[in-house]
Amino acid sequence: MSGLFTPFLFQAAVQSITPILLASLAGVLCGRVGVFNLALEGQMLVGAFAAIAGSYFAHSAIVGVAAAMAGAVVFSLVLAYGATIFRGDPVVIGIGMNLLASGLTAYLLRVVFGVSGTFSDPGIVGLGRITIAPLIGVPFLGWAFGRQSALTWVAWALTALVSVVLFKTPVGLRLRGVGEEPDAAETLGVDVAGARIVTVLLAGALAGLAGAQLSLGAVSIFAEDMSAGRGWIAVVAVMLGRNNPLYAAAACVLFGFADAISIHLQSLGLPNQLTDISPYVATLAALVVTHRRRRRAASPPAEVAAATPGKAEARPEGR
Amino acid sequence: MNGRPRWSALPLSLRPPPVALAILFAALTGGALVLVSGHNPLRAYADIVAGSLSLGSLPDTLNWATPLVGMTLVAAIPLRGGMVNLGGDGQLVIGGLIGALVPLVLPGPGAVAAAAALAAAALGAGLYATLAAWGETRHGIPMLISSLLLSYPAVGVTSYLARFPLRDVTTGLPQTAMVPAAARLYPLSGALNVGSLIIAAIAVAVVFVDRRTVAGYELRMRGKNLRFAGYGGVRLDRQAVLTMFMSGAIAGLVGAIVVLGSQFRFIDGALLTPAYTWSGLMAALLVGGEPVGAIVAGLFFAALQTGGFAMQRDTSVPRVLALVLQAIVILFLAMRQGVGRRFR
């Protein structure tokens, strides 16, 4: 086992946690205001593409990150307005957005950059890593955080920030009210639809950051469908964490290590087709195990109802 | 409230049909996209129509429609009962791999081998799909999530098998050995084969079950109101498992039909790159799982994608535009459905 817990494993794990963590924070925010966000995968993909485009044309990673946030926010308008003003089913909208993101980024990749599959260019400026010299040699924590991109630090800071805002501030109380009892919130003078729209758009910016980490973080390329299920894993992390940012972050840590271990197994010579599935298997196992723990709770998890289209009436947000 | 269209006051027969509106909206948005990328949208659309519906290209459209309509049914059946099967990709490759292997190991006449391969593919993929249903009924994991997450291991393992233990070492490609000629599906005309007839028969059967049988009625009842169906005596858990088995079995059949009818071997990734699963899901979502509408939508998407090839050839507009148009139609309809309802 000593061969497994190397500095590299910790670094790789924290690196793969970053995008999932940012996306699951986006999911947590949406879930808290009663909008089930299944579009994380698509939002990340749009962010990843916008990040590459921004960085390529402006030769600046900062512009790339800003473009990722802006692109994902614009894309999130579909969910923000679709699930509120237009009263669409968030499940159908989420699936539609994921497919739109997949098609749109593939289309733009061909039209804007004239390539299909993957795009890489020396003109793309990646995020780079921040090396914290005194930390690097420290076992575990230092291995994990000694050399990471700025977005990793942003992601963990945002986890703390989102927790504090949600649970310790009046704004957070209102947001949670919007999700739990929209009618009561409305009676108290909270603009429910407005709060949902703003939250979904903010969450879109977070998912955009997740995309920027994917395309500008470890490598500076864009590949078609490069989000590769990470958005769905973030959705699961939100479910496992029951819309609590800290619990969701714990779930992300689990997936991140599963991912890092799969990279490690690959370096031992196992074919990557087999090792790549480990985060998904870990996710399924986590879902089964946590349900065992919760089985005594009488009511089925609200997400089950929310994740079923055509069940608008059964959704917790009420009508 | 804002956003409610004025025509909601009109009698139902005078309102613009939402599907036509959605297609028009998608065509306009897509046209803008084509225009911005420096091509003529009218020419692109003319190419799509000519490249899919002209007499010469109709067999190609039908050949493309075979797996796509099959995967539409895969998505539509659970959707009818308010469930979502996002694991079509996994079930598809399981069926494809089983379909490619059975004729290689089974002696006997070709037709028997082909029939056995199809049956085994349906059974294998169907059983795999029931795992997702079981995840929901036993473990409380939403089927939407469990079916999708189960898809990745299936894709990974079949890919590994086709690349390593089962690879045809006489070629340099990640694919299994060729299926013997006798076990291939009988060709009808051009690229079309008996597989298209099988899918057509299944489509008819699905419509019949939906409209004329107790099982279809109970599934629709579940889709309308889960609790009411349970109260009315429907055994919900059993229904979920059976529905997912049927859905997965059809996905497996589609995989085996593509393998035995067109590719003659399991090629890693070949069943997934055309994104039949997702186009089928979109077609089914378009009409909320109603089978006849879903089949029509599946045929429409197949025409759109087949025409996309012609468009890419003639105007160099990338054919992924077809996927973009499909997604816009879905999103437009998803929102349009809610517009008529009273807000709060």
Image (cartoon, coloured by chain):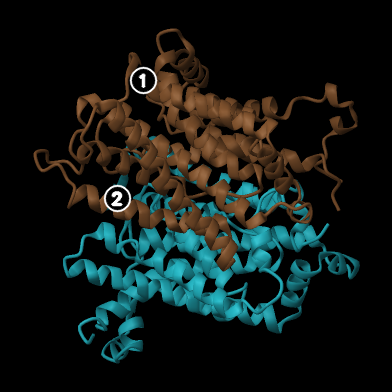
Chain colours: A cyan, B brown
Circle 1 packing at 10 Å, graded few (<14), some (14-19), many (20+), is many
Give left or right: position of A171 versus A124. right
Please tell me which residue lies in front, A303 or A248.
A303
Residue B308 location in percent, x, y?
43, 24
Q: Determine the chain carrying the residue at label 1.
A: B
Residue B195, located in which quarter of the rendered image? top left
The amino acid sitting under disc 2 is Thr
Q: Residue at x 47, y 27 (%)?
A: B199
The residue to which callout 1 is attached is: B193
Residue A174, located in which quarter of the rendered image? bottom right
Give left or right: position of B291 versus A177. left
Q: Quick one: SS at disc 1?
A: strand
Image height of B60 relative to B147, above or below: above
Image height of A171 relative to B73, above or below: below
Quarter occupied by the N terminus of chain A: bottom left
The residue to which callout 2 is attached is: B158
Residue A293 location in percent, x, y?
57, 80
The amino acid sitting under disc 1 is Asn
Please tell me which residue lies in front, B6 or B333.
B333
**Can you see residue A175?**
yes
Q: Residue at x 38, y 49 (%)?
A: A57
